[in-house]
Image: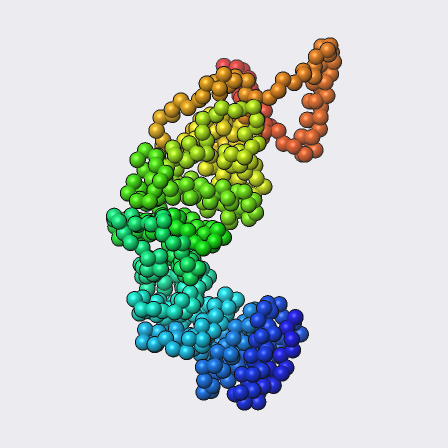
Amino acid sequence: MDPSSAPALAALESGNKEEVERVLQGYNRQNSRTFTFDQSEEEERKKMCDEILKTLQKDLGPSCQATCLETIRILSRDKKILAPLTTRPAMLALMRLAGLEYAQSSKQEISNFNVIIEALKCLCNIVFNSEKAQQLSVDFKLVSGACERLKTHRDKNLPHEIKFFDLRLLFLLSALRMDARAQLKEEQGLLLLTDILESTLDVKWSHKYVVATDCRGPPLSNEQVDISVELLKALFNVTYDCNQQQIDEDRAHQNRHLAAILCHCLLLKTQSEDKTEEFHSHTVNLLNNIPASSLDLLFSPSIKCGTVEYNGKKMDAVEVLLGFMENRIDKGSNLKEGLTPVLSVLTECCRTHRDMRKYIRSRVLPPLKDVKHRPEIGTTLRNKLVRLMTHIDTGVKHTSAEFLFVLCKESVDCLLKYTGYGNAAGLLAAHGLLAGGRGDGQYSEDEDTDTEEYKSVKSFINPITGHVEDPMPNPMDGMTEEQKEYEAMKLVNMFDKLSREQIIKPMRVKPDGTMGPLEEAANEYTSDHNSTSDSDENI
C-alpha cells in the first residue's frame, strides 16, 4: 500500500519548483519499490499524473524534470491510472523528453542524461501496460525514432542505459504490436540489430560465417550481456516469421551471418553462471527462428577454439546446447518455456544435419548395455528424456519424444528399444505408427549398433517396459481348468461393466496405425458378414 499522495499533490498544485522537487523526491524514495497501490487513492494518483504533466511544460531545469519523470515511472506501474498518460499530448511530451520524436532523434545531441533515461523508463512502463499507448507509439513512429538514434550513434559512444532502454522499447513494441514489428522491418531492423550485436560483442571474423572466438578471452561484462540480451529479444521478434517467408539470397546470407554470431554467443562466458544461462537462453530462442539449413555453422570445422571434434567437425557449440538442455531438465521447473526451445532446435538440426544427429545420438543414446533397469530410471540423458515422454505437460512430452524419435531416424523399432512401448505410445499414436514402421523423415540406412550384452538378453526384454524383468510366479499355477475359466469370465464381466458405464473405452490399432474404438471393428465384421450372407442368397 503506497503512502498518501496528498502532500505531493498539494506541492504540485502550489507550483513552487523547489517545493515540488523536494516533496516528489520524498515520495519517490518511499515508493521506489512499490508495485501494489491502494485502490482508494486511484483518483488522487490520476490527478498527480495530470499535475506532473502540466509541471513538465514549464521551465523547470533538468533536475526537477528528472524527479517528475521518476514519479510518473512509479505511478505508471498501476495499469488503472494510465488514462492521463496515454493521451496524444502526454505521449508526445514523453517522447520529446526521451529524445525519440522521429524528426528530432537523428539530430539531437545526448544531453540531460537523467531526463532521457527517466522518460524512456516511463515509456517502457506505459507501453507495456496500455494498448492505447501501444497504438499511439505506432502512430507517432516511436520505433523509427529509436532506430534513428541507434543508427546515428552507432559509431559513437551512446550511453549504455540509453541504448538499453531504446532496445527495450523496440522489443516491447515489436512483441506487442504486429504493425510495430512491420515498422521495425521497414527500418532494416534485422541488419541494424545484428550490426549492434556484432559491435557489442566485439565480433571479429576468421572466415566467412565463422567468428574468431577467443575461448581464453575475458568473460563478457554485465553491460555487454544486458545489451546483448535486449538485442537477442528484439531480433527474435523481427525474425519470428522468417521460416514462413520465401527466402531470397540476401535473407539467406543474413540468416547464415546471424547463425554464425549465435554460435559465437554459445561459446562465450559471462561474469556468473546465472548470467551465462540467461544469455544462452535468449540465444537458443533466436536459433529457433533461423532455418535449420543454416545451422550447420554450429559445428563448422573452421571454428578455431573448438576442442570437441567429430568427423572433422567442431562440436563445442553443440555440447553447450546439450549441457544447457540437461541443466534445464535438472531444474525441473517451468519446463515448457525453459526446455522446449532447446529441444526444438536440437530436433530440427538432427533432422537436417547427419553429422550433428550422429554425434548427439552418441551422447544421448549410446549403444545399450544395461537393460536390467527401466529406461526412465537412472541419471543419464537418455533416462531423463524418457521420463519426460510421460510428462503432464503435452508440449514437454511431445518435444522430448520427438527429439528421441529423430535421433532414432524415426524408426519405431529403434525407439522402442531405447524407451519401451509404454513410454513411446503417445508419440506413436500421434504419428499413426502404433503398428510399427517409420516416420516420414529421410535418413541414411540403419547401422547395427547392438552390443553383445544387448543381443544376449534381447529375447528376454519386456517390450512394454523396455527392460529385462525378474521372473514372476504364474498366478494360475495350481488352478484347475474350471477355476481358470471362472477367473477369465470374471475379468471379462468386469471389463464389460466398465465399458457399458463408459468408465473405459476399449480401443484397437487400426490398419493405418492410429487408434479407434473396438466397437468399430465389431460393426465392420457384422457388416461384412451380412454382405457375404446376402450375396450367397442372390441368384
Provide residue 173's location: percent of width, then percent of height. 44, 64
Q: Is residue 496 above or below residue 25?
A: above
Q: Is residue 424 above or below residue 30?
A: above
Q: Is residue 262 visible?
A: no
Provide residue 131's location: percent of width, then percent of height. 50, 67
Numbered circles on residues, count: 0
Provide residue 245's location: percent of width, then percent of height. 34, 51
Which one is nearer the viewer's eye here, 163 or 344? Answer: 163
Q: Residue at x 50, y 70 (%)?
A: 126
**Which image quadrant for residue 299?**
top left
Provide residue 283's location: percent of width, then percent of height. 41, 51
Which one is nearer the viewer's eye here, 170 or 20? Answer: 20
Q: Residue at x 45, y 72 (%)?
A: 117
Q: Residue at x 32, y 38 (%)?
A: 313
Q: Is residue 238 above or below residue 301?
A: below
Which one is nearer the viewer's eye here, 387 or 415? Answer: 387
Which one is nearer the viewer's eye here, 92 or 245? Answer: 92
